[in-house]
Amino acid sequence: MHDLIADMRELLEPSAVLTGEQLGDKYSVDYTGENPHEPLAVLRPKTAQEVAAIMRACHAAAQPVVIQGGLTGLSGGATPRPGEIALSLERMSGITELDASGMTLTALAGTPLQSIQAAAQEAGCLFPLDFGARGSCQIGGAIATNAGGNQVIRFGMARNLVLGLEAVLADGTIISSMSTMLKNNAGYDLKQLFVGTEGTLGVITRCALRLYPRLPSRETALCALKTFDDTVALLSASRRHLTNSLSAFEVMWAPYFDFVTEHVENCDSPFEKRHPIYALVETEGTDSEADSTRLETLLGEAFDGEIVADAAIAQSEAQREAIWAIRDGIAEIARMLTPYASLDVSLELERTQAFLADVDTALKEAFPDVTILVFGHFGDNNLHVFVTTKRHEDLEQIHKITYGITGRYGGSISAEHGIGQLKTGYLHHSRSPAELALMRTLKAALDPLGILNAGRVLEVEDATAA
Ligand SMILES: Cc1cc2nc3c(=O)[nH]c(=O)nc-3n(C[C@H](O)[C@H](O)[C@H](O)COP(=O)(O)OP(=O)(O)OC[C@H]3O[C@@H](n4cnc5c(N)ncnc54)[C@H](O)[C@@H]3O)c2cc1C
């Protein structure tokens, strides 16, 4: 180990290798704060060639490595396990090419998502991947977790925005699949090996991304609803009326909405009365007048059909931000109600209501004082179920109960946050034995020594068992 660190100091510039007191707390845990471990060292390369040299040396020494992006992940994927070296992409940041007419952007993997959004906007384009951690997460981390966020209903997840990738394998081989072409059926689409596989098959070092034209018009409404069926009807009407311009359909159930509007600063309800469910509907397009007419027609029909009980349309950017602040208030709630289980599940729409009823009954039976707050990307069938008793010792049982029910309903235990280390024991609820076996085969083929992000997605003994 000592020799390996000494080799790294020779290979990289001195400030690229951190050990001992230089480490601080920063590299010990991701956003979950669960199971922190100080890495043996942090290596901070600047180029793909340096990443390749690090991986060659670690492979030769059978040294386990954890890849770290912005550490905003919500599944413990970037949190070191005992005995791991951390490979941080924080110094591999920058946009290397932006083609506004071809609508493509090339960036190093450590570039913050927000910098990519800003560069696209400056060039008159849009990079539509967006979520709360935009300022601190890196594009490499967002691709490795196939992050989703607020505009998936229209633009898809990170996977849909990646045209090409460069990655380094566990043995140091550089795979450059940096095509910027929309169409490329020349053999296997190798970049998909690295999208959403949470760093278990390679280190993403560079990416070519797809941009869209900037959308100058945006209309946002908050709707109050009486029932789940009304919410489904509003989603269906929104898809019909707003067609391709529907960019967000976020739903908050009353316990979440009431908690945020009562306890979080600057999150006031625009409604006089309380309602069982709330939907945030947003449309983005190129013609402000036509977009606003379409939204008003949608809401007019929804009122006439008694689908919507009340609605508030944002008349300014400040009002739009005030509506989104309620939806984004979860970050503040998480700080208030820690420790908590933040479940991120996907379900078929028609099974969602029964699923939520079963989860509610089972959790309240197990923990009579439990708080359950549900909200999420309803238009993508993705629910965030926030559960807390404020007792750390209850978390495992909460996960067990909820993921068991998710499996019974044929849902996914991770819609967008990934499996990381925290959900490996539950993956069998959403994947068949044959699917798990194929994952193990891929892992063993690309990382036969099991040194790269071991214990993420697949349990350690699984990963090397193929
Ligand atoms: C406030 C907040 C809101 C969020 N909202 C959403 C949301 O709406 N939708 C959503 O999908 N997610 C959301 N997330 C979680 C989201 O997954 C992460 O923010 C982001 O995708 C991870 O990026 P990161 O750079 O921080 O990665 P990290 O946390 O550092 O790492 C995440 C995983 O990716 C691996 N990894 C990191 N970089 C690389 C790389 N270059 N190559 C290979 N593997 C790598 C790590 O080893 C780890 O397994 C949110 C997080 C926060 C804190």
Image (cartoon, rainbow, N blue to C red):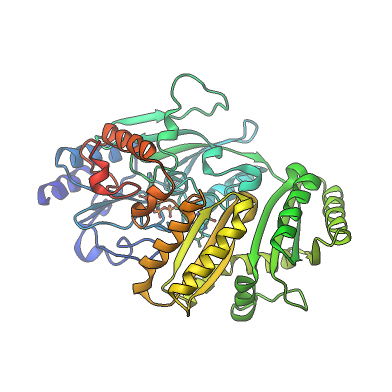
Whether residue 50 is visible here, answered yes or no, is: yes
Q: Position of residue 281 (x, y in %)?
A: 72, 57
Location of residue 432 by image quarter: top left
Compared to residue 199, the image places residue 255 above or below, namely: below
Would you say 285 lies left or right of 160 here? Answer: right
Would you say 380 lies left or right of 427 here? Answer: right
Q: Indicate the quadrant containing the C terminus: top left, top right, bottom left or bottom right.
A: top left
Compared to residue 225, the image places residue 262 above or below, namely: below
User: In this view, which residue lies farthest toward the left?
Assistant: 3
Which of the two residues, 5 or 306, is positioned nearer the viewer here? Answer: 306
Would you say 302 lies left or right of 399 here? Answer: right
Which of the two residues, 147 or 128, is positioned nearer the viewer here? Answer: 147
Residue for point 32% across, 58% down: 79
Whether residue 376 is visible here, answered yes or no, is: no
Q: Position of residue 10 (x, y in %)?
A: 18, 45
Residue for point 22% across, 66% down: 21
